[in-house]
Image (cartoon, coloured by chain):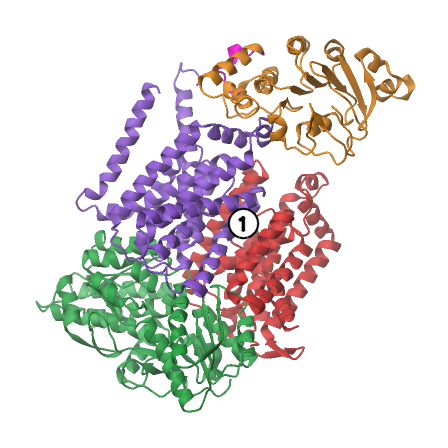
Chain colours: A purple, B green, C orange, D red
Amino acid sequence: MRFSDYCSLTLVIGLFILAALLPLIPDSDYLMSLALPIAMYTVLATSWALFSGPTHYISLATGAFYGVGAYVVGTGIEFIPYPVLLLIAGFSGIVLAGLVGIATLRLSGVYFVIFTLGLAELIRQLVTWIQNNFTGSRGLYVLTDITENYIYWQLIALTALVFLVGWLIKRSRLGFALRIIGNDELVAGHCGINSAGCKVILFMVSGCFAAVVGAVMAPRFTYIEPSMAFSPELSFQVVIMALLGGVHRLWGPLVGVIPFTLLWEVIASSFPTQTVLLLGVSFLLIVYFIPDGVVGRLEDLVKSMRLARPGSNRG
Amino acid sequence: MKQLTQLIILIGAMFFAGLSSAAEPIKIGAVAPKTGPLAGGAAITQWPNIQLWAHQINARGGLKMSDGSKRPVEIIEYDDRTNPAETIKAVQRLATKDKADFIVAPYGTGLNLASAPIFAKYGYPHIAVSAITDKTGELTKRYPSMFFTLGTTTAFASSVVDILKAMRDAGEINNRVAMVNVADAFGIELADSARPIFKAAGFELVFDKSYPLGTQDLSPIIKGAKAASPTSFVAWSYPPDTFALTELAKIENLDVKAFYTAVATCFPAYAGKFGASIEGNLGAGGVNPDAPELQDYYKSHKEVTGKDADYWAGPVTYASLQVLEQAIEGVGNTDRAAVTQYIKDNSFKTVMGDWKFNNQVIDQYWTVGQWQGGKFYGVGSTGKAGQKKAVIKKGW
Amino acid sequence: MRFSGLRAVDCLSFNVRENEVVGLIGPNGSGKTTTMNLISGVFKPTHGDIVLGDRLISDWSTREVARAGVARTFQLVRILPTLSVVENVMAGAVFGSKRLWGRELNRYAIRLLEKVGLGEMINVPTASLTYINEKRLELARALASDPRLLLLDEWLAGLNPTELQIGIDLIKTLRDEGRTIILVEHVMDAIRSLCDTCVVMNTGSKIAEGSPQQALSHPEVIKAYLGEDHA
Amino acid sequence: MEVLTNGFLLGATYALLAMGLTLQYGVARIMNLANGEMLVAGAFAAFWAFTANQISPFYAVLFVVPLAFIFNWLVYRYLLTPLVRRAKSQGQLEVDTILATFGMSFALVGIMLMLFGGEFFTYSYLAEPFEIFGSPYGLNRVVACLASVFICGLLFWAIYTTRIGMAMRALTSNPDAASLVAIDVPRMSALAFSLGGAVSAVGGIMLSTFLTLDASIGVVFTMKALIIVIMGGVGDIRGAIIAAMVLGIAETLVASLIDPGLTLAAAYLLFILVLLFKPEGLFGRKAI
């Protein structure tokens, strides 16, 4: 590693420590109510971008994995220790993503989008059917002593983990393969890359994170209703946040999550009766005016500044 | 459009109320769905009652404080889009940023339970009206400022069974019951607790199926239930399915002596849609609409909000606001701990009769209602006065 | 290598021996590129067999064919624009028969770049390469897997005379190294100076085979290229 | 027999749902996720006409169709054309339109909430039994089914016999080639999109006679329509009709014979199976 790498590593670790200390600030409750969704969406959007960034597949399955994670905790909380449940949730996410990936990643882009959109609905129905006919009302209540702060810390730890995993993938053969696939899938095949396999692995990583996030969040909701756990809205929010930030850099989604959560908060608190309308409009504005994401915009800006500086050379 | 003008009028009213009494308003937060799956229900039982309550209080100058001054109420509304994460965020925002003095409980079991820790954390009295759960004991122990008013799942299920049992003992129906439920938390929980109760009472569930939330065509359900030739039909249903099941039962001429659909049977829109044919239909909830205080309530509800109130959760929501109102005036200031304690210790006169919380739970409540002569009368309860006798349904 | 089948390419059969350069020529639309795609696994033959060494590879995917040691370039150059020049070459050496990584990979890629004459272009953005340099880069990527069989699809097309000479010399060095190459070309000079054997195709079928001289003077070939009058 | 008739009625309803989206996605290449909201808007109009003005929902068609057409034309012209122009590839256009129309669906829900509030709206119209083969069915369902058959027939006729229809079919199979043979692609796309919107609104009117709806329910219908369109093969009206029928009958069969709790699961399963074994849809052509 070079010196600058050490610098950025220190910076990143410092930021994480700062973020983790947030709940300890007195009167930080309102801040926390924003920081918690930011942390949650950062994990979701970053892990989403790990898959969708390089493969260009828009996955709307986040809600499905999230719901599965929440249900694992809901069903098992009374007789399995919580940390084990997190592992089971992650594992379920991996298995589900693997199955779905093998079945659908051969489909073309738009079919994949629709399929994943339906996936949350499909799983919700299977889960409720099983619950209805076999387990009864078990799995609905999650009464634990896990406080908001602990949930937040778990999410921060997950954020660190997702960044670490993302960084490791980037440096690995897998990451390199993905960049080639993203450029030209035919060439990738001729280079001996198993593109379907790479996509499935990534989808599994992303599904695992989403499921664990669902599991972590479950205690916060106390009562798990299927229609809310498997919410398609969540999937879309993750997509739009990641795209707003930019999916080609590891930290891109983070840059999208923060402004979007804040914007959301401003809309929700200032225009409580027109929330949905304004959300729709802001959604449209993002699609029309920031198509390359904030990161893209930033990079353009940096580029134009460099060009504007006299005597500077390219690169 | 209508809503917009109403809003303007409301704001105007508040403005003038604010002018006439210089006292600082009491901030009341309100979080409930305006969009999402539960928005339809909240638009009938939650929002209009908050509007009515605020209107009435401000019309009489505000809440009386111990120093003799009158403080109007100011409602801060948030839409949680039927998303528990948003409910939590909105309640937290109300508590920390808006510094609301009190917060009206959210709408729906899930949203109430999700936000309960926040209410507890900041010491807000949390009169969870539209929450039906069997875990009231555990929840009230965990959250000392949480109150329940609508009843428990088991009470709802056993009340229906009791009514059917009475009918059977009178020789009006036989043992054959068809039961269906919507496969969402509410329906699953009710069906799950109803099954053993039916069995214990000697009923036979000749048809027992669930259907997914959002099913467009429920006719296979009604056809299937009809084929099992029951004399009673029980559906633990949500509003859209309540309407659909009733319409289909009518079309198919499902000839049962007892026809029960859960949520929304008590909605005015239900009567509006089906007219006289719903005579004898049973549903969740119920009130005693002949009680004078309720008659006043229905009249002013129509005047202020322009809509008819329903026959169950709406009046209960209003009653919970009356509890809050009387507790604040009883304490004479906005000390939340004192108000919570006051709610625990005192009894209240509400549109639903006299209320006294027993271990933070109202244990006398309506469970089953029936359309009789164009009104939805309570026919099953846990010890409410003015209960009518359930009658059998005589065709569509 | 035996080969036959498919409507676009029909009744085609030829062998390539090790260390041999085979030229595949024919008028436009005669099925040359399709043949390349069949060998490299992009298409699967409906009839007939493709054999590499002693293994039947007809049903293999591009990935499997590549891992078995077949590398190719494309008629329309396909470089990877968001990767650097060095990374473009690395792409060939990581996943196929060669599985390099780390410093070794980097050195290996730079060596190959120098070999194809791109030694000075290592730090140039990929998007700003000239046409011949794009072609060189693609060749370097194909070579990176150290292939048993190299497929060059009109690699010399579109080059100006000076570049053409450089290109021919480059392929010559590859031949002298003992590489096995199938060459699709329109440039007859190149065919003459590079190929050991030459297969001429028209409308999907083989019409002649032999040394370049023999094949190009075959009456069918002249007819196919120049029309009836010259036959 | 009863099950089949019921399945047919449901299938016809689904065909009505999907017809609009088929035009919008098949011809105009817009994967319109706001399609369901258009449908709900149509239903709202019928509800309003019926309850406030005692106008039969079928007369409501007369003013809903032109309004929906104009509205959708404006949407296409001013909101979607920039995306079409910007898109470098079909894939990018798909992503952009999916996101944009999702935003639109939010905005439309917001507008409807503002205008009508969030309550359920439902009314009784033709809710009388109608006997087919000796068993009763809702007359409103039967009428909706007939309307669906009529609309599908009309579209079928228009697409397969008129000049404009031929242009649209050309557009479906290859937009680039279509522009080469002097088909005004932008105008034709706008026409198809607006027509699709109008058809969806009519579907909403029909549905409102027997379903209970509210402002935010549109996404449910969008989802169903998407499944049908993709199952049927993009841009193919015949495919969409057959897929709708298959789905309707399959759902009814599962609900009647196995368990109503699994109807939607069965629908998705069918969807996956079709995609896996015939990725181009029941009637679609193989991509080249």
Label 1: which residue?
A114
Q: Position of residue B104 (x, y in %)?
A: 26, 64
Question: Residue drawn 71% across and 54% down?
Answer: D159
Please say whether residue A128 is one of the residues in the magenta stretch. no
- In this view, B138 is above or below A283: below
| Front residue of this view, candidates B1 and D162 | D162
Q: Quadrant of the N terminus of chain A?
A: top left
Q: Along the line of sight, which residue is nearer the eye, A36 or A156?
A: A156
C127 displayed left or right of D155: left
Q: Amino acid at mark 1?
A: Ile
Q: Residue at x 39, y 64 (%)?
A: B185
Check if residue C126 falls in the magenta segment: yes
Q: Which element type, helix, strand or loop, lies under badge 1? A: helix
Q: Position of residue D142 (x, y in %)?
A: 62, 72
Q: Is residue B285 visible?
A: no
Where is A20 relative to A222, above or below?
above
Mark 1, other Cα within 10 Å: few <14 / some 14–19 / many ≥20: some
Q: Quadrant of residue B343?
A: bottom left
Residue D18 visible, this orientation: yes
Q: Quadrant of the C terminus of chain A?
A: top left
| Residue A137: quadrant of the picture | bottom left
Q: Residue at x 14, y 62 (%)?
A: B337
Image x and y of residue D212, in percent:
49, 69
Q: Is residue B134 rendered to the left or right of residue D142?
A: left
| Residue span colored magenta | C116-127
Q: Position of residue A48 (x, y in %)?
A: 44, 41
Chain under disc 1: A
